[in-house]
Amino acid sequence: MAAKGEVYDYVIIGAGSAGSVLARRLAEDAGVSILVLEAGGSDRSVIVAMPAALTMPMNTKRFNWGMVTEPEPGLAGRRINLPRGKGMGGSSSINGMCYVRGNPMDYELWEAKGATGWNWANVLPYFQKMERVQGGGPYRGTDGPLRVTRGPEVNPLYHAFVDAAVAAGYPRSANMNEVQHEGFGPMEMSVGDGMRASAARAYLRPALKNPQVRLVTGAMVKRILFDGKTAVGVEYLRNRRVEVARARREVILSAGSIMSPVILKRSGIGPAQELADHGIPVLQASAGVGENLMDHLELYVQYACTKPVSLFPWMSLPGKALIGMKWLATRKGLGATNHFETGGHIRSRAGLVYPDIQFHFLPLAISYDGKSLAKGHGFQVHVGTKRSKSRGWVRLRDADPHSLPRVQFNYMTHEEDWQEMRACIRLSREIFAQAPMADYAGAELAPGPEAQSDDALDDFIRRKVESAYHPCGTCRMGTDPLAVVDPECRVIGVSNLRVVDASIMPQATAGDLNGPTIMLAERAADIIRGMTLPAAEDAPIMADHDWQNRQRGPEIARNYADDRGALRAQLLSEMTL
């Protein structure tokens, strides 16, 4: 435990995905001392370690902060559940373990939006550095800290879903994390040896073997301390006492997309009027802190299964007990997978250069949080849009560090969001109507065959759409007046303070966010150390050769790597708000 006023080279706020990476990588420099402050506790638990138990930790007070949004105006005032990881590993200890790099064009868009140096050729080496991929190809990493595997795909429904998508005219992808992101095929998961490969397991625990790295749990950060405009330490609460830790070199804020802007604001960095409203002296007025909040929304399209091949029988108490016992004994079986073993990425319409819809297929009809199960064999896709134009905010409830902030995403407040979400449903139905699914697809359970008109689909969307738990963007990286950090993750207007987590993403990626967050922290650690890896000489950026005129095609054949200027202009035009 840090004694009051104890000094370290780096003080890292948050032991989540990004903070865990930073602790391990910064400690590779000899003699560097690091303190990691974490408000939660240990991640050691069977329900965290077992992949199939993924819905359980997010439903506990021990591992989840228990946040909900403010009433969402685009969803008739619904409050949406917002699980955020609490404890070692952060949200990587409660997420669905889906490992998706995103599309290479995501990172071209980052750079086009002002994140200089974060293009695909520059970030690809960091994906390779972090990964230890089962059967990795030429663009993958095979000896990094993060275990990445594929599920066994023994259930016939996985293959029927992909075959049906191909029958509908979409391309097949051998691996959506390699050259071809667009299309349908196997999904990867952050699982190794049958156990969740969280950031705590991959990065933080190895880092803690170094005596120069210390972790303090139960540490609720009040504010960052400054000498003038130079960050010099952190004030935090632990066991009802105020403690101080000082930083010789830097304070690094890695508390996540919700809490990082909150801590900045409590420290005097943020919109001047909001700080004044809560009696907080303004150190650095920064209008973008807590703004630009993005997320991925999704819903499920469910069908009854006409053959007894789904996971439904395993959802009984005896079935779950058998899964658990086998996993405890062998780390194998149905307990060793997240069950999202195939999926896809497509474009919602012609004229988009890269996918804005993602599918996660599940051979079971159940809600994402595991609380609602269909009464029989079934299957579903979790499907949602990845590049919504709706933007929200994170704001202080008050100045008390124990108070959770006010969060509003403004979900579905941009007209294009409705067009894209309707497309999610209609395109899913079309896939399930193809011949490869004929032996399995029974009655449509949700939205239900009666929901055909735009109004009927909109009603279903309004009532049933849920967060995919991918908030980002609240401390956006860039160079414009609303940017919070510069392309080296330094907080603009002050010294010796960086933000490194998903909050600095200029744009949500087209896929699950945990992999990109770990990559971001890997590269940020090297930036801090002054030793970034050279750009990849071979970094293909693939698209449908006729994307301007068709929504789908059987192959992805055009490489934009040598035409990045025109590509970035197109990407910016697609994301004009």
Image (cartoon, grey):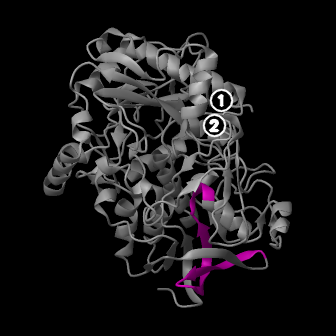
291 horizontally vs 157: left or right: right
Q: Nearer the viewer, residue 215 or 141?
A: 215
Q: Which span is picked out in magenta?
A: 229-258
Q: Quadrant of residue 560?
A: top right
User: Does the image show residue 353?
Assistant: no
Q: Where is residue 252 in the image (x, y as percent from the top left)?
A: 59, 68
Is 218 drawn above or below residue 98 in the view shown? Answer: below
Q: Residues within 10 Å of mark 1 (few under 14, many from 20)?
A: many
Q: How crowded is mark 2: few (under 14 residues within 10 Å), some or many (20 or more)?
A: many
Is 159 drawn above or below residue 390 in the view shown? Answer: above
Query: What is the tally of numbered marks visible in this picture?
Result: 2
Q: Where is residue 182 in the image (x, y as percent from the top left)?
A: 46, 25
In reply to whether residue 234 is colored magenta, the answer given is yes
Q: Position of residue 402 (x, y in %)?
A: 62, 71
What SS does tag 2 mark?
helix
Residue found at the very far front of the displayed protein: 375
At label 2, the amino acid type is Leu
Residue for badge 2: 109
Name which residue lies at 22% across and 20% down.
307
Residue for badge 1: 571
User: Does the image show residue 72?
Assistant: yes
395 horizontally vs 128: left or right: right
- Tell me which secondary structure the magenta stretch mostly adopts: strand
Q: Nearer the viewer, residue 49 or 313?
A: 313
User: CB atoms at circles 2 and 1 under 8 Å apart?
Assistant: yes
